[in-house]
Image: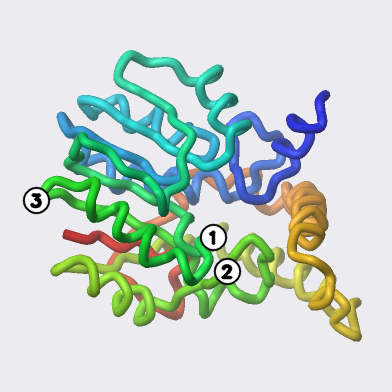
């Protein structure tokens, strides 16, 4: 296995359907795609930050065309090799720098905004707004900060509460509606066990030496630590399916992820 493939396999940020230790994250992610899929029928769709490409591939089942961009060359190569359809195009591009002459009916950007450095968030949102037709709709998802920030993800520059996200997005869109991704008792048990393991590991760093480790190194450590946590939690997540998640009007104290629908 090449170094590139090894890093891809261990990555905590790129969830792939072939990963044997998906944990509950894959069906959680796919619930969001199922939610927005209903808006994509016979539409021209663009995805900012396509990750493994599986979500974009699903959207092609109903969309006229799907353009999926990601800033990682290896990821896009993986997507092009694995998912091939006439109405699907993968492209290397940074979300905050994307410019296209074509306009789209629907824009999707799941689990991306938290990865954007603060000085580039405005460019990122402007790129999405610019890519949409006048009556286009945008779907943005992100972890719900009050419930998710305990794991100190070094890939994330900023995690948002519902109020923070709506305030930010309202500067670019006239209508912003927030929904939450919630889990049933099986998911809640998994999340409880995951939090216990993460906090237990962090408590071992009594002097918080992680705060002086360079971000890139913390990301590598986080990837491998998350991989082994997922392996240990397989017992709790093996039965988790997309049906174990619900999407409803945002309830800040119970939502794992936030989904913003913007017009």
Q: Earlier in the sequence, mark 3 or mark 1?
A: 1
> In this view of the protein, which residue sits in the foreground, 31 or 102?
102
- Counting from the top left corner in percent of width and height, residue 113 is at 45, 61
The chosen color scheme is rainbow
Q: Is residue 14 left or right of residue 232?
A: left
Tell me if residue 71 comes above or below residue 121 in the rendering.
above
> In this view of the protein, which residue sits in the foreground, 81 or 100?
100
> CA gap, disc 3 to disc 1?
27 Å
Is there a contact, CB below 8 Å, between mark 1 and mark 2?
yes
Tell me if residue 128 comes above or below residue 173 in the rendering.
above
Report the residue at 81% width, 26% height from top: 2
> In this view of the protein, which residue sits in the foreground, 226 or 86?
86
**What SS does tag 3 mark?**
strand
- Counting from the top left corner in percent of width and height, residue 61 is at 29, 25
> CA gap, disc 1 to disc 2?
6 Å
For the N terminus, give its image quadrant.
top right
According to the picture, the residue beneath numbered tag 3 turns out to be: 135
Q: Residue furthest bottom?
A: 207
Q: Earlier in the sequence, mark 3 or mark 2?
A: 3
**Mark 3 neighbour density, 10 Å: few (under 14) some (14–19) many (20 or more):** few
Report the residue at 48% width, 61% height from top: 184
According to the picture, the residue beneath numbered tag 1 turns out to be: 115
According to the picture, the residue beneath numbered tag 2 turns out to be: 157
Query: Which picture quadrant has residue 22?
Result: top right
Query: Which picture quadrant has residue 171?
Result: bottom left
- Counting from the top left corner in percent of width and height, residue 206 is at 90, 84
């Amino acid at each position: 296995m090449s170094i590139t493939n090894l890093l891809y396999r261990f990555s905590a940020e790129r969830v792939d359907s072939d990963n044997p230790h998906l944990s509950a994250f894959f069906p959680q992610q796919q619930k969001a795609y199922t939610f927005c899929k209903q808006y994509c029928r016979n539409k021209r769709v663009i995805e900012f930050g396509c990750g493994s490409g599986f979500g974009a591939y699903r959207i092609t089942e109903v969309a006229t065309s799907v353009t999926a961009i990601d800033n990682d060359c290896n990821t896009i190569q993986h997507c092009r090799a694995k998912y091939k359809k006439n109405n699907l195009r993968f492209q290397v591009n940074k979300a905050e720098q994307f410019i296209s002459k074509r306009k789209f009916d629907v824009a999707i950007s799941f689990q991306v905004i938290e990865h954007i450095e603060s000085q580039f968030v405005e460019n990122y949102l402007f790129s999405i707004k610019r890519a949409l037709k006048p009556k286009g709709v945008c779907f943005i998802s992100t972890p719900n900060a009050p419930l998710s920030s305990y794991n100190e993800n070094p890939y994330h520059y900023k995690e948002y509460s519902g109020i923070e996200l709506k305030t930010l997005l309202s500067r670019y869109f006239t209508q912003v509606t927030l929904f939450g991704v919630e889990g049933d008792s099986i998911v809640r048990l998994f999340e409880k066990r995951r939090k216990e393991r993460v906090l237990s590991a962090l408590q071992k760093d009594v002097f918080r030496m992680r705060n002086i480790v360079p971000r890139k190194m913390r990301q590598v450590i986080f990837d491998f630590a998350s991989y082994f946590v997922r392996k240990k939690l397989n017992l709790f997540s093996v039965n988790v399916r997309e049906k174990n998640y619900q999407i409803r009007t945002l309830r800040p104290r119970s939502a794992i992820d936030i989904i913003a629908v913007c017009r």
